């Protein structure tokens, strides 16, 4: 295909003093493409173009991926959320919240060992991350590994600003190991931090019951029953406590409520 040189780049092309080996209207051969591109105004532009306003940086892209995965989980598309979070961690292994969210998903879909490995791997990268330490301690507690859980939760505990999760699971780990009196202050703190959490009041009632504080136990269990009316455990435990106190009619009512809650 024949090509002609035409004046398109600069108004002074072809004038005397230029080094062009051809003139306007000349046929162009393949040697023209062998030289550098002609940029008559290149000196007026910066060597690197400034970023386009509004272009997302790496951090905002990562956060966008995290929120999309959370939305998939909210819609019940848990496998899609797991895949998205795995990709997120491949791109950003230090994304702690993404790691915690993925660990929860793995745990609830039947892979507790995978969840534990994920949290342990995160702590290998960020040993000072309290959230990861707290989540691993809570995970260990939920799966009955209370001595290991206690060690993690004590390390995660911030005396200046304790969280409901750390205090709840630390108290529960102590309770399950028979250290009832030690468990009570942690569970009281958890209930104070999260006054709408029926689980905190349930375990507080259990700890007080085991420690011999029957009146305090009954108050906590009544609160737990009010906050979690579909959970039979506070009703059943209150029934046992009332049996112990000889309040038979009230105990029978609590056992009836436990049966009803279990059917809900």
Image (spheres, grey):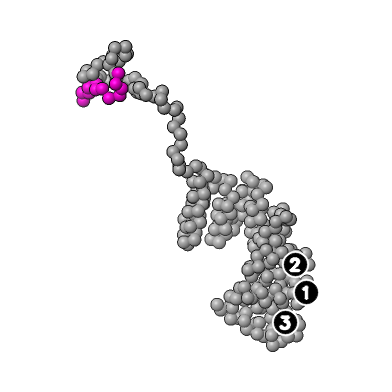
Residue 6 part of the magenta segment: yes
Confirm whether residue 179 shows in the render: no
* Residue that label 3 marks: 242
Cα separation, mark 3 vs mark 2, equals: 20 Å
Q: Secondary structure at mark 3?
A: helix
> In the image, is 101 to the left or to the right of 215?
left
Q: Secondary structure at mark 2?
A: helix
What residue do we see at 70% from left, 56% from top? 161
> In the image, is 77 to the left or to the right of 177?
left
What residue do we see at 75% from left, 65% from top? 185
Check residue 256 in the rendering and tell me which mark sits there, or answer none.
none
* Pointer 1 local density, CA inside 10 Å: few below 14, some 14–19, many at least 20: some
Counting residues from the N terminus, which is met first, the one under dot 2 or under dot 1? 2
- In which quadrant of the rendered view does residue 264 lie? bottom right
Cα separation, mark 3 vs mark 1, equals: 13 Å
> In the image, is 185 to the left or to the right of 19?
right
Cα separation, mark 2 vs mark 1, equals: 10 Å
Disc 3 and disc 1 in contact, CB within 8 angstroms: no
Q: Residue furthest top?
A: 17
Counting residues from the N terminus, which is met first, the one under dot 3 or under dot 2? 2
* Magenta region: 1-12
- Where is residue 42 drawn, in percent x and y? 39, 24
Disc 3 and disc 2 in contact, CB within 8 angstroms: no
* Residue that label 1 marks: 213
- Where is residue 215 drawn, in percent x and y? 75, 77
> In the image, is 252 to the left or to the right of 47?
right
- Where is residue 134 drawn, in percent x and y? 66, 55
* Pointer 2 local density, CA inside 10 Å: few below 14, some 14–19, many at least 20: many
Q: Secondary structure at mark 1?
A: loop
Disc 2 and disc 1 in contact, CB within 8 angstroms: yes
* Residue that label 2 marks: 184
């Amino acid at each position: 295909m024949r090509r002609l040189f035409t004046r398109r780049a600069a108004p002074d092309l072809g004038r005397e003093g230029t080094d062009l080996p051809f003139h306007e209207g000349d046929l162009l051969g393949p040697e023209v493409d062998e030289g550098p591109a002609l940029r008559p105004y290149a000196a007026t532009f910066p060597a690197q173009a400034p970023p386009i306003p509004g272009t997302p940086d790496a951090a905002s892209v990562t956060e966008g991926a995290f929120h999309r995965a959370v939305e998939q989980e909210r819609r019940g598309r848990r496998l899609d959320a797991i895949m998205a979070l795995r990709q997120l961690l491949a791109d950003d292994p230090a994304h702690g919240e993404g790691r915690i969210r993925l660990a929860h998903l793995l745990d609830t879909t039947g892979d507790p060992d995978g969840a534990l490995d994920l949290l342990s791997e995160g702590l290998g990268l960020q040993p000072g991350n309290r959230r990861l330490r707290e989540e691993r301690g809570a995970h260990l507690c939920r799966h009955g590994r209370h001595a290991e859980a206690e060690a993690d939760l004590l390390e995660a505990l911030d005396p200046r600003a304790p969280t409901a999760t750390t205090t709840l699971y630390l108290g529960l780990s102590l309770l399950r190991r028979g250290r009832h009196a030690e468990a009570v202050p942690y569970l009281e703190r958890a209930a104070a931090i999260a006054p709408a959490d029926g689980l905190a009041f349930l375990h507080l009632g259990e700890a007080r019951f085991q420690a011999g504080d029957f009146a305090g136990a009954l108050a906590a269990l009544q609160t737990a029953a009010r906050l979690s009316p579909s959970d039979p455990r506070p009703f059943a435990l209150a029934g046992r406590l009332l049996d112990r106190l000889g309040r038979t009619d009230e105990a029978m009512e609590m056992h009836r409520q436990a049966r009803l809650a279990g059917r809900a």
